Image (cartoon, rainbow, N blue to C red):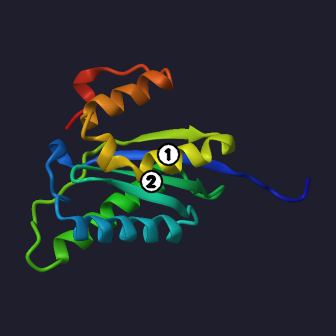
Amino acid sequence: MAQSLSKMLVHVIFSTKNRYGFLVDESLRREMHAYLASIFKAYDSPSLITGGTEDHVHVLCSLSRNQAISKVIGEAKRNSSKWIKSKRGRSTKFQWQSGYGAFSVSPSQLAQVRAYIASQAEHHRKMTFQEEFRKFLQRYEIDYDERYVWD
């Protein structure tokens, strides 16, 4: 085959440092989601939907065949952190957690994952970020040590 073709859908999840509610203001949260989407797009990994709550984000993206997921997420976190700190009146203490979760998504599950991300505010009335993330780790059968998941 002369061409290299791929379609890798990835559900990315990461939180603010210590799950602090830096994004409690809904307007700022929407701006952050849009800014994150622009970074994913710049790394040829367009966001299909970006959402979350005051303490974490979810990004469903189509990962570039030319970029490592760690590079795309690292740049998204680094650049968005710099961006929010530059906004007048915003906390210069903003930080993302050092880690992240990245989970593969089947094209047949695309609509369900989009709906899940779109309903984050409602979803988190019943469940904390930590409970949600543990469920993802269990569903994807990822071994983890609780001591090293949170920061």
Q: Is residue 113 left or right of residue 124?
A: right
For residue 20, say whether it is visible: yes
Q: Is residue 100 left or right of residue 126?
A: right
Question: Could you say where residue 45 lies in the image, as x and y percent from the top left?
Answer: 56, 61
**Secondary structure beneath label 2:** strand
The residue at the point 49 percent across, 59 percent down is 49
Q: Is residue 78 left or right of residue 136?
A: left
Q: Quickly name the residue at label 1.
A: 11
The residue at the point 52 percent across, 51 percent down is 114
Q: What type is the residue that disc 2 sits on?
A: Val
For residue 142, say whether it is visible: no
Residue sitting nearer the eye, 91 or 25: 25
Q: CA distance from mark 2 to mark 1?
A: 6 Å
Asked which quadrant contains residue 131, the reply is top left
Question: Could you say where residue 86 lies in the image, as x and y percent from the top left?
Answer: 18, 76
Q: Earlier in the sequence, mark 2 or mark 1?
A: 1
Question: Could you say where residue 3 lies in the image, as x and y percent from the top left?
Answer: 85, 59
